[in-house]
Image (spheres, rainbow, N blue to C red):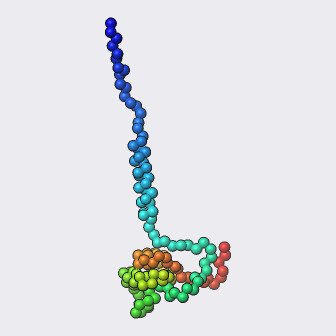
Amino acid sequence: MPSIHRRPKKTTMSEINVVPYIDVMLVLLVIFVITAPLLSQGVKVELPKVASEPIAGDNKEPLIVTVDAGGQYYLNIGEDPKTPIDHQGLVNKTAAVLRLKPDTPVMVRGDKEVSYGSVVIAMALLQKAGAPSVGLITDVPDEPVKK
């Protein structure tokens, strides 16, 4: 009698192929790594690491934005530095000065009674105008600061 070769029955494969899942995970990781720095908000401020020292005189007149106790802004340039300036005017005048003299130091002087938010808004407006960094003007304390 001739022998009949039977094929073995096909069994279902019970393994899960994880390679596509790894590919998707790596793509998501790359997307998150690229977009995470773009999501950070705020004004960049370089905090001092030691007791602050006066800024070395470089004979450049700084652009000074003053925030009074009422939250109004003043700019030390223009027709009348004692006249309050609106947000758009502050951005426009600061941008014009920085276009003409890009290395002009930019400073913010805030009244001690003004809200923190008003000073941060001033810094954000200066950043919008193109200021690469913003310094804060303070008075020298009466007594030395203890470490």
Residue drawn at 38 percent across, 30 percent down: 13
Residue drawn at 42 percent across, 77 percent down: 130
Place of residue 7 in the rendered image (x, y in percent of width and height, measured from the top left): 35, 20
Residue 59 lies in quadrant: bottom right
Place of residue 5 in the rendered image (x, y in percent of width and height, measured from the top left): 34, 16
Relative depth, front residue between 138 and 27: 27
Residue 51 lies in quadrant: bottom right
Find the residue positioned furthest to the top. 1
Residue 51 visible (yes or no): yes
Find the residue positioned furthest to the bottom. 79
Place of residue 86 in the rendered image (x, y in percent of width and height, measured from the top left): 38, 83
Residue drawn at 51 percent across, 73 percent down: 45
Relative depth, front residue between 3 and 132: 3
Residue 110 visible (yes or no): no
Q: Along the horizontal axis of the image, is 81 left or right of 7?
A: right
Q: Along the horizontal axis of the image, is 142 left or right of 25?
A: right
Of the 4 image quadrants, the one containing the C terminus is bottom right
Q: Along the horizontal axis of the image, is 78 left or right of 136?
A: left
Residue drawn at 36 percent across, 81 percent down: 88
Place of residue 136 in the rendered image (x, y in percent of width and height, measured from the top left): 52, 79
Relative depth, front residue between 49 and 70: 49
Against 32, residue 124 (above or below) is below
